[in-house]
């Protein structure tokens, strides 16, 4: 699986509810499924709380960053994605924005995340596919 290849490991499998076609979530995960990835000076944890939120996102998940001993924690709130870049900064997406947090726990106080891209004002534009992209090539 891609997440395992990228260094993520499941630390709690979670308990998935039966499918619910009427509630706000198709599946509730309680206790949540937790995956984590080691980073410089700590680890990133993502907790999956539910799937297929009606008229919203596919995953209802929260994130946090902890130090190596698990004593200090930075709550990222609700996230769509999170990972670390090559220099140890934590990057995460939430609410249509992309954030960067410089190397958490590298000093005495954790750094605050900084919004590096706000994509909320962007929208899709309908495009007509070019003729060469409309049909698959013939294979023998």
Image (tube, rainbow, N blue to C red):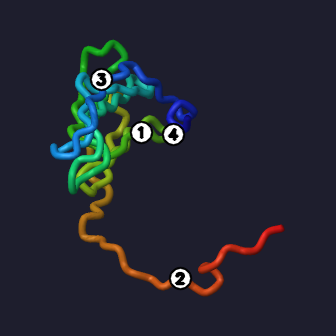
Q: Quadrant of the C terminus?
A: bottom right
Q: How much space separates mark 4 and mark 3, taking CA atoms?
A: 33 Å
Tell me if label 1 and label 2 are in contact, CB under 8 Å: no
The residue that mark 2 highlights is 129
The residue that mark 3 highlights is 15
Residue drawn at x 23%, y 25% as measured from the top left? 30
Tell me if label 2 and label 3 are in contact, CB under 8 Å: no
Instruction: State whether residue 97 is above or below residue 7.
Output: below
Q: How much space separates mark 1 and mark 3, taking CA atoms?
A: 24 Å
The image shows a total of numbered marks equal to 4
Numbered disc 3: secondary structure:
loop
Q: Quadrant of the N terminus?
A: top right
| Residue 112: percent from left, percent from top | 23, 39
The residue that mark 1 highlights is 83
Q: Which image quarter: residue 26?
A: top left
Mark in the foreground, 1 or 4: 1
**Crowd band around label 2 with a 10 angstrom C-alpha radius: few (<14), some (14–19), many (20+):** few
| Residue 42: percent from left, percent from top | 38, 23
Q: How much space separates mark 1 and mark 4, taking CA atoms?
A: 10 Å
The residue that mark 4 highlights is 86
**Crowd band around label 4 with a 10 angstrom C-alpha radius: few (<14), some (14–19), many (20+):** few
Tell me if label 4 and label 3 are in contact, CB under 8 Å: no
Instruction: State whether residue 60 is above or below residue 12.
Output: below
């Amino acid at each position: 699986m891609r997440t395992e290849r990228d260094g993520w490991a499941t630390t709690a499998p979670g308990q998935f509810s039966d499918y619910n076609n009427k509630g706000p979530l198709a599946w509730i995960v309680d206790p949540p499924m937790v995956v984590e990835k080691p980073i410089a000076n700590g680890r990133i944890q993502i907790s999956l709380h539910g799937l297929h939120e009606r008229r919203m996102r596919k995953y209802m998940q929260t994130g946090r960053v902890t130090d190596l001993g698990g004593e200090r924690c930075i709550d990222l709130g609700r996230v769509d994605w999170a990972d670390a870049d090559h220099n140890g900064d934590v990057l995460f997406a939430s609410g249509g924005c992309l954030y960067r947090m410089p190397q958490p726990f590298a000093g005495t106080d954790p750094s605050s995340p900084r919004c590096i891209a706000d994509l909320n004002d962007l929208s899709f534009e309908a495009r007509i596919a070019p003729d060469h992209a409309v049909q698959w090539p013939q294979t023998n």
